[in-house]
Image (cartoon, rainbow, N blue to C red):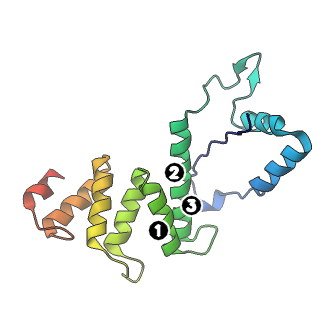
Amino acid sequence: DDQIYIPFTTYDGPAAQVKMFPDPVYLTKRVVVNKGKEELQKLIDKALGNDETEGQPSSGEEKPTEEKIIGDILDAIFQYGQFLHHGIGTRADQRKSLSFYRRAAVRGHVKASLRLAQAYDFGDDEGKGRNPRRAIVWYRRAADSGDPSAMLNLGICYERGYGVGQDYREAALW
């Protein structure tokens, strides 16, 4: 099997505690060249707590499912968008952050859908880029997934007729 599985996780702590690691692509190539793919897979499994001893995973947990891995990747894409938006570890770039929010949102990431809706609702720091109709689309997507902030904002949009026709009944539902 030529595939190597690397699940991703997100970091929600303070930016000051974010640690940068050496380039993973470079390190991966070095391990493969020097020790082979099997050794790289062993190192990854050990780092993830999936190191097998006597046929039993050391952590007592099963390997992550494909759905979990995809969710973690979408979380990482969203988190990178957050870093770009707020200038954490890089120069702030709101336009580029929106492209990462959109990448995660179109694949069903609820927080990314909400953040994208807010970006269309309020625009950038100068108020540019506002698009009420697009905001409604993304608020609805996040609200349909149960996000309480999206539900509230969608209700307010219906109450005020922002991006949709004013509809007090629809507003009350959200």
Residue identified by numbered label 2: 74
Q: Is residue 163 left or right of residue 127?
A: left
| Nearer to the camera, 56 or 3 | 3
Give the labeled residue for mark 1: 98
Comes first in the chain, label 2 or label 1? 2
Say whether residue 151 is left or right of residue 97: left
Residue at coordinates 46% horizontally, 68% vertically from top-left?
Answer: 98
Secondary structure category for the residue under label 1: helix
- What is the CA distance from the residue labelled 2 to the residue labelled 3? 10 Å
Give the alpha-carbon distance from disc 1 to disc 3, as whole Å.
10 Å
Among all residues in the image, which is located at the extreme front?
1
Please state the horizontal and vertical placement of residue 147, each as a whole percent of the image: 32, 50
For the point 20% across and 71% down, which residue is it?
162
Q: Residues within 10 Å of mark 3 (few under 14, many from 20)?
A: some
Judged from the image, the secondary structure of the residue bearing numbered disc 2 is helix
When asked about the image quadrant of residue 31, the answer is top right
At label 1, the amino acid type is: Leu
Point out the residue furthest to the right here: 34
Asked if one can make out residue 12 in the rendered structure from this viewpoint, the answer is no
Location of residue 85 with respect to 10 vertically, above or below: below
Tell me the residue that label 3 is attached to: 80
First of labels 1, 3 by sequence position: 3
**Amino acid found under the numbered disc labelled 3:** Tyr
* Amino acid at circle 2: Leu
Q: Residue at x 30, y 67 (%)?
A: 134
- Vertical placement of 157 versus 146: above or below? below
Calculate the distance from the C-alpha at mark 2 to the C-alpha at mark 1. Answer: 14 Å
Q: Does residue 23 appear left or right of residue 106 in this picture?
A: right
Q: Quadrant of residue 118?
A: bottom left
Q: Position of residue 111 (x, y in %)?
A: 41, 54
Question: In the rendered image, which quarter is residue 138 located in?
Answer: bottom left
